[in-house]
Image: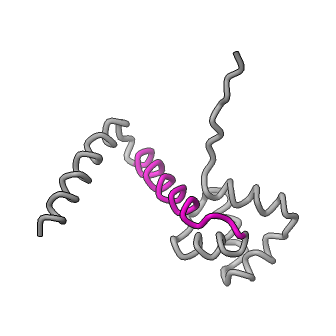
Amino acid sequence: MASSKKVISTVGEQLRAIREKTNLPLREVATSIGIDTSLLGKIERNERQATKEQVKQLAAFYKIDEKKLLKELLSDQFAFKILEEDADIDIFRVAEDKVEYLKTNHNAK
């Protein structure tokens, strides 16, 4: 039986792959969305996190699903924070409970 392995990559890696597939120079993409070329390079290399606005601009530039890319950005932020804090994966269960708690309390107001 053939197993289908899920391909996981960061937003930066995804953006770099799209840019390279479309044969666009880093400078052209950066200029088109109004950021510095070196900043875009750092985003693609996971040395910096893109902002939500930058992700929206890049999604529009590449004509890709903005909502999906923003979801990927948020998951990157979670993953990098977990690594940075050397936290256990169980933290997600606690966070999930807190999200439900906050939704309930927020909706009750």
**Magenta residues?**
63-84
Residue at 48%, 52% (x, y): give it: 75
Q: What is the x, y in percent for residue 103?
A: 22, 59
Nearest the viewer among 107 and 81 is: 107
Q: Is residue 9 above or below residue 49?
A: above
- The N terminus, quarter of image: top right
Q: Residue furthest top?
A: 1
Q: Is residue 87 above or below residue 59?
A: above
Q: Is residue 98 magenta?
A: no
**Residue 90 falls in image quadrant:** top left
In this picture, residue 88 sits left or right of residue 108: right
Q: What is the x, y in percent for residue 3?
A: 67, 23
Q: What is the x, y in percent for residue 27?
A: 79, 76
Q: Is residue 89 above or below residue 12?
A: above
Nearest the viewer among 74 and 84 is: 74
Q: Residue furthest right?
A: 23
Q: How is the image coloured?
A: one colour
Q: What is the x, y in percent for residue 24?
A: 84, 69
In this picture, residue 53 sits left or right of residue 23: left
Magenta region, main secondary structure = helix
Residue at 78%, 63% (x, y): give it: 19
**Residue 40 falls in image quadrant:** bottom right
Q: Residue furthest left?
A: 109
In this picture, residue 44 sits left or right of residue 94: right
- The C terminus, quarter of image: bottom left
Residue at 47%, 58% (x, y): give it: 74
Residue at 60%, 59% (x, y): give it: 47
In this picture, residue 40 sits left or right of residue 52: right
How many numbered discs, if any? 0
Nearest the viewer among 86 and 54 is: 54
